[in-house]
Image (cartoon, rainbow, N blue to C red):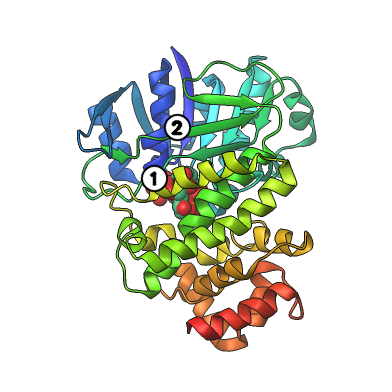
Amino acid sequence: MKQAVHFGAGNIGRGFIGALFSESGYHVTFVDIADQIINQLNEQKSYQVKLATDKQETTTINNVSGLNNMAQENEVIETITNTTYLTTAIGPNILPRIAPLIARGISERVYQTDEQLYVIACENQIGATDILKQHILDNLDEDTKERLEGRVKFFNSAVDRIVPIQEDNDSLDVLVEPYYEWVVEAEEDIPAVEGMTIVVELAPFIERKLFTVNTGHAVIAYLGYLNGKPTIDKTLADEAIEKQVEATLKETGDYLVKQYGLDKEEHFKYIQKIVRRFKNPYLNDGVTRVGRAPIRKLGPEDRLVRPATEAQKAGLQFTNLSKAIAAALLFDHQEDEEAVKLQAMIEENGIAKVLQEVSNLTEDSDVTQEVVKQYDLLK
Ligand SMILES: NC(=O)c1ccc[n+]([C@@H]2O[C@H](COP(=O)([O-])OP(=O)(O)OC[C@H]3O[C@@H](n4cnc5c(N)ncnc54)[C@H](O)[C@@H]3O)[C@@H](O)[C@H]2O)c1
Ligand SMILES: O=P(O)(O)OC[C@@H](O)[C@@H](O)[C@H](O)[C@H](O)CO
């Protein structure tokens, strides 16, 4: 049977990427540090993916097993030597931590076989596979690096499916939205995986996704949090917030249309479709999940700052994006490590310095000045 190794047996791992591999005839070995999930995968050898609809259509995902990357390093290395695909959905900040073990697996593999290995990071970050690749290369010796040529291929990708935090922690089953899109940048034919779309240039796809789905999501999460709302759909029921989301997505939309020559009407329809997805009442997607890790989300290449700086450079509006950045700076959720750290940084140095450090924005930049204004209005 064809093999896929997937790092991160969480919501997207089980609910999307792992499920697609299984449905495409692969055996999927999930690698994770969560013992409970790994043990359950090995005991049950299957789980269910349920659609967040009134009928809750259900698919059984078979041919799955699990390995713990802390306790079963040798088994993970052995599995990497036999797999066709190696994918991740683990969070961008975790990629450097798993790279050394992946590098050890690749080091064994390239001396044992000439079969191609395809590596794809499925994270919400531009160039996530490039980042993972660099961390892997940092852990390889020169001889092994030379053997990668023609044996290991790295492809960037964009993944889109809303998978909330699951209500029943004791179950492997995953509730997911019906919609999904997995776009992979490759200039060659690669082994077929159902639901994977191959494109030659990913930039328009990942930017359109990140700066519409994830920008819109972030606006709802941070404004919802500030207004004491529990979930994304309940936040969007507030008309003023819905208008704010639309105004922000108009700003990212104007940038995307200009940058990639997108059809304005088509893009507007895309935005409307995304907002309908956000309104799904069956997902119960918490604002604290969607707003998680605000330091990452305020990064210079991420969903808020990049479209704002790009809009500013192109002479386009960025007031609403600045308001979204200000709302992110006010996300003080105590259970979120990055939110706690961000608040401590703001307390110590003020937001202009924080934007310099976290978002690479100079204190006198137009975006910083607008964010400061919006922050004072929101506070
Ligand atoms: N949930 C979504 O709607 C969604 C959609 C598209 C993309 N994504 C992206 O997918 C990635 C994963 O998100 P998620 O929602 O599935 O998160 P998640 O928290 O549900 O899953 C992450 C998994 O990684 C595991 N993990 C953490 N550190 C690890 C380590 N050092 N070694 C091995 N395993 C480790 C965790 O135990 C967990 O099972 C993120 O980059 C996210 O942005 C999520
Ligand atoms: O996963 P994050 O933290 O980058 O972003 C939170 C959500 O916006 C995200 O998980 C979406 O649900 C997902 O990107 C939809 O495809």
Q: Secondary structure at mark 1?
A: helix
Q: Quadrant of the N terminus?
A: top left
Residue at image point 76% right, 24% down: 149
| Relative vertical location of residue 127 with respect to residue 115 in this rendering, above or below | below
Say whether residue 91 is visible.
no
Q: Position of residue 231 (x, y in %)?
A: 31, 60
Residue at image point 62% right, 51% down: 253
Distance between mark 2 and mark 1 Cα atoms: 19 Å
The local crowd at label 2, few if under 14, some if 14 to 19, many if 20 or more residues have their Cα within 10 Å, is: many
Name the amino acid, label 1: Arg
Callout 2–callout 1 Cβ contact below 8 Å: no
Q: Position of residue 168 (x, y in %)?
A: 21, 48
Q: Toward the viewer: 96 or 112?
A: 96
Which residue is identified by label 1?
277
| Relative vertical location of residue 262 with respect to residue 318 in this rendering, above or below | above
Say whether residue 217 is visible.
yes
Name the amino acid, label 2: Ile
Mark 2 vs 1, N-terminal side: 2
Q: Toward the viewer: 343 or 58?
A: 58
- Count of labels in the image: 2
Which residue is identified by label 2?
17
Locate residue 216 relative to residue 362 in the image: left or right.
left
The local crowd at label 1, few if under 14, some if 14 to 19, many if 20 or more residues have their Cα within 10 Å, is: some
Of all residues shown, which one is farthest toward the top? 1
Q: Position of residue 175 (x, y in %)?
A: 28, 40
Residue at image point 36% right, 74% down: 227
